[in-house]
């Protein structure tokens, strides 16, 4: 049985240094996850959810932006499950693009591992994992280490928010949330090695900024992704045709 087929068990994790590399690599991002998780716990109680409901939402949904939107809708009295599910699905459409990017690697894993890593897929885990792929290739153990460390941190910080929310009215005021965009920039900049990557990055940034101003909700993320993919595909096609 090869490494790709082995179960994600404690023994397997202990034998894989890549797992711990994934945990360590996600460290800077975890600093930004903590205040958001605490805020999620605080907002859940404020919206009328019980402590258990708030914590279980983080453990079963594990999608920060979707949770914040769902909690806001519940707090506003919107309780229709159809509308809640549809809205959160729209927010997370970007996961289709991230999943497609990782599909060629994950398809080689077992069905169980594919399902587990898909559930744990986040912007942060994707950024760290894709950076590792460009540097040293794909490692399921690294991917797992990054993903599970983010999941555990999100769950524990939500619990902390539920327990001490009354004493920390605005965790985001700590400024630790800046750690996430700063880490994303550190991961992105080394990837800008040619004209196409620079142009695609610029297009995505401009569309995202404009979309955040003029588009409702989180549509700017979807539009920016699609715009960048379109421009990148056209430039790659023109480059191949010129050869």
Image: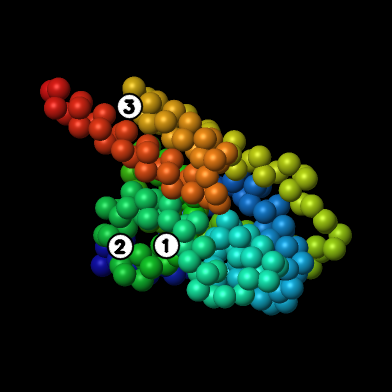
Mark 1 residue element: helix
Residue 177 on image: x %, y %: 67, 44
**Closer to the camera, 153 or 17?**
153
Mark 3 residue element: helix
Residue 14 visible: no
Q: Residue furthest right?
A: 167
Residue 67 on image: x %, y %: 60, 63
Residue 140 lies in what quarter of the image? bottom left
The CA span between labels 2 and 1 is: 10 Å
Mark 3 / mark 2, whichever is N-terminal: 2
Q: Nearer the viewer, mark 1 or mark 3?
A: 3
Q: Residue tagged by mark 3? A: 196
Q: Residue tagged by mark 1? A: 117
Q: Is residue 130 above or below residue 59?
A: above
- In the image: residue 154, left or right of residue 119: right
Q: Are marks 2 and 1 in contact (CB under 8 Å)?
A: yes
Residue drawn at (47%, 58%) of the image: 90
């Amino acid at each position: 049985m090869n490494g790709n087929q082995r179960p994600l068990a404690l023994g397997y994790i202990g034998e894989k240094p890549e797992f711990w590399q994934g945990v360590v690599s996600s460290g800077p991002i975890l600093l930004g996850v903590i205040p958001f998780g605490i805020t999620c716990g605080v907002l859940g109680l404020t919206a009328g959810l019980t402590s258990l409901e708030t914590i279980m939402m983080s453990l079963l949904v594990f999608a920060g932006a979707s949770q914040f939107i769902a909690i806001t809708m519940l707090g506003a009295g919107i309780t229709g499950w159809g509308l809640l599910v549809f809205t959160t699905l729209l927010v997370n459409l970007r996961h289709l693009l991230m999943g497609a990017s990782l599909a060629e690697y994950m398809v080689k894993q077992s069905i169980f591992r594919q399902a587990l890593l898909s559930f744990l897929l986040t912007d942060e885990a994707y950024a760290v994992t894709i950076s590792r792929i460009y540097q040293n290739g794909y490692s399921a153990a690294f991917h797992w280490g990054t993903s599970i460390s983010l999941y555990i941190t999100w769950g524990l910080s939500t619990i902390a928010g539920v327990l001490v929310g009354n004493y920390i009215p605005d965790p985001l005021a700590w400024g630790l949330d800046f750690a996430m965009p700063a880490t994303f920039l550190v991961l992105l900049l080394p990837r800008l090695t040619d004209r196409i990557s620079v142009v695609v990055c610029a297009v995505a940034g401009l569309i995202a900024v404009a979309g955040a101003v003029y588009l409702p909700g989180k549509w700017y993320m979807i539009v920016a992704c699609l715009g960048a993919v379109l421009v990148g595909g056209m430039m790659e096609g023109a480059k191949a045709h010129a050869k």
